[in-house]
Image (cartoon, rainbow, N blue to C red):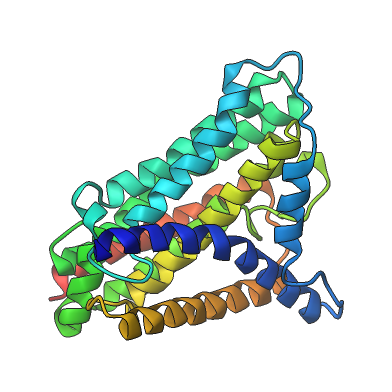
Amino acid sequence: MIPWLLEGLQCLLTLLLAPGLIGFVRLLKARLQGRRGAPLVQPYRDLAKLLDKERVVSTQASWIFHAAPFVVFASTLVASLLIPLVAAPLPFDRVGDLIVVVYLLLLGSFFLALAGLDTASPFGGMGASREMTIAALAEPTIALAIFGMGAGAGSTNLGEIVARTLAHPGSTLGSGHLMAFAALFIVMLAECGRLPVDNPATHLELTMIHEAMILEYSGPYLALVEWAAQMKFFLFLALLSNLVCPWGVAVALRPGTLGLAVAALVLKLAVLAAGIAVLETRLAKLRLFRVPELLGVSFLLALLAITSSFLVR
């Protein structure tokens, strides 16, 4: 029963810590820019406020508009069952690997793009087009980068990659890991709508990507979409930290070990979030036609990572 309880713990951690991680990044950015900034709990307050509001739905909307928030939220939450957050391996590792995780995240993006088109809003259609362009370039990079990390472990299962890296770090960790980390980091910025690809704090419709698709959402629907976006950011950072630096992930299911694993996860996420906050205060948003060039660099890094994993043994 303990492994199944751990799966529930991973879902609970994703639900509870994801808004706080976003609040931490916003607070750090505000302090770096000389502002006081909103408190760490502000994202939780925003979600509670949205859940209590009435939803307003366009007369042009079909069932896709109503279903999209639930599909986006559910697919992201299911992905949290397959990503090793605090322990590895876990029961659901047998039914999903990196391919399943990639397509679960892509399923949410696909339905969100459909919802942007569904209301016949010009800004929604523009955001959906941009989102699909980025997804077409980003998803192969994610798969290649994790394949590069999994080649040394001999598996595409995320839990197995973490467990074998912890057991045999000398034979699984190599030069390709650094390039895979860089590739995943760039893709994370694009997929999660962070600078320099997108500005999560923008209010200019012509520069929006993710936010343009959800302009028509309000109330509980908007809360689900925002919460799913926060969980996606949390899961990407967890992937970056636990695949490249898996130390701290529990392989022995004991209370003390699990407590240390949760503390290690929070610490690694805080370090990555601090790096992102510093990066976003130093970079300006790229022009849209320059984004494929940046993602092309990430794809090349992922390709070099998987090549290095086979050539350097």
Q: Position of residue 272 (x, y in %)?
A: 53, 75
Quadrant in the rendering for residue 197? bottom right
User: Is any atom of residue 253 visible in this view?
Assistant: yes
Residue located at (75% from left, 23% from top): 57
170 shown above or below 209: below
Q: Position of residue 253 (x, y in %)?
A: 25, 75
On the rendered structure, is 303 left or right of 169?
right
Residue located at (37% from left, 47% from top): 102
Quadrant in the rendering for residue 145? bottom left
Q: Nearer the viewer, residue 108 or 181?
A: 108
Quadrant in the rendering for residue 70? top right
What is the residue that sits farthest to the right in this orientation? 35
Residue located at (52% from left, 39% from top): 72
Q: Quadrant of the C terminus?
A: bottom left
Q: Nearer the viewer, residue 232 or 176?
A: 232
Q: How many marks?
A: 0
Residue located at (75% from left, 30% from top): 216
